[in-house]
Image (tube, rainbow, N blue to C red):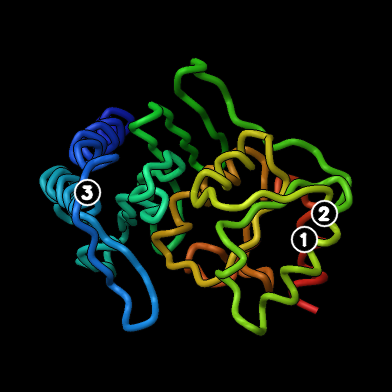
Amino acid sequence: MSAVDFESFVRDLARLSGEAILPFFRSSIGVENKAGLGAFDPVTEGDRAGEAVMRQLIKRTFPAHGIVGEEYGAENEDAEHVWILDPIDGTKAFIAGIPVWGTLIGLARQGTPIFGMMHQPFIGERFWGDGAAARYEGPAGQRSLRTRPCTGLEAATIMTTSPKLFDAETKGLFEQVEARCRTYRYGADCYAYCMLAAGHVDLVVEAGLKPYDIAALVPIIEGAGGIVTTWDGGPASGGGRIVAAGDKRVHAEALAILNP
């Protein structure tokens, strides 16, 4: 990897995927349902185009690396370095014309996320981190990302993409946490985690996530000073039930309820 300008490479991944995806945003695109009868898990040509162009560039530049993507599955996933891609995290927002979706670009080494970026090409924002630091670039310029202090749940703003993420077992636990918080917001997909890293949100609680939904966000959150784990306190990069907090005090209180 040392022979490649990593920062330029990741910027190329973001730029090229954005160029592939944006023609399909707020257009009369066709939408397919990947889920079975009675459920809705949409995929668009924008998803496929964005992932395809990233895979091509990764294979050309780092042929020994593995790739795990939402649309085209896994290749060489036992490699030391594996890219974890979600071309449009928030496809339901995408097809509704709401710009709270993003392209997630993650890199793991021996299974541990070491770099992540969330790129929103319509707004022109990028959030990225390596676990030690995190940065923002967009219409407001460039700056470091830092989570904000929060004394506990009673002072916290909590987010989740939708209460319908939770099944009968997990819904009650989430509602207990939400009831303790000062205020709540729904519907931001990957943006919720980036707003946590930027110091605008204190807690994100979700369930049913896949690795490509969260792996790229872990180095951003941790680089900004936050903490992200599963509900039982384990590593978040594999997905599942996820809790992210900007302050360890909030995280500890949430875990006490979510993992009684």
Count of numbered badges drawn on the protein: 3
Q: Residue placed at 33% from the left, 54% from the top?
A: 86
Q: Reading the chain from its start, which is encountered first: label 3 or label 2? A: 3
Q: Residue placed at 52% from the left, 46% from the top?
A: 219
Query: Could you tell whether 194 is left or right of 213 in the image?
Result: right
Q: Which residue is mark 2?
A: 181
Q: Position of residue 18 (x, y in %)?
A: 26, 36
- Cα distance, mark 1 to mark 2? 5 Å
* CB atoms of marks 3 and 2 within 8 Å: no
**59, 153: nearer the viewer:** 153
Asked which quadrant contains residue 3, the reply is top left
Q: Secondary structure at mark 3?
A: helix
Amino acid carrying mark 2 in the image: Cys
Q: Quadrant of the N terminus?
A: top left
- Label 3, residues with CA under 10 Å away: few <14, some 14-19, many ≥20: many
Q: Residue placed at 22% from the left, 51% from the top?
A: 51
Asked which quadrant contains residue 162, the reply is bottom right
Q: Which residue is mark 3?
A: 46
Amino acid carrying mark 1 in the image: Glu
- Cα distance, mark 3 to mark 1? 34 Å
Query: Could you tell whether 92 is left or right of 129 in the image?
Result: left
Q: Quadrant of the C terminus?
A: bottom right
Amino acid carrying mark 3 in the image: Gly
Residue lying at the far top of the rendered structure: 141
Query: Could you tell whether 94 is left or right of 55 in the image?
Result: right
Q: Secondary structure at mark 1?
A: helix
Q: Which residue is mark 1?
A: 178
Q: Secondary structure at mark 2?
A: loop
Q: Position of residue 256 (x, y in %)?
A: 82, 70
Res. 201 in view: yes
* CB atoms of marks 1 and 2 within 8 Å: yes
Residue lying at the far front of the rendered structure: 28
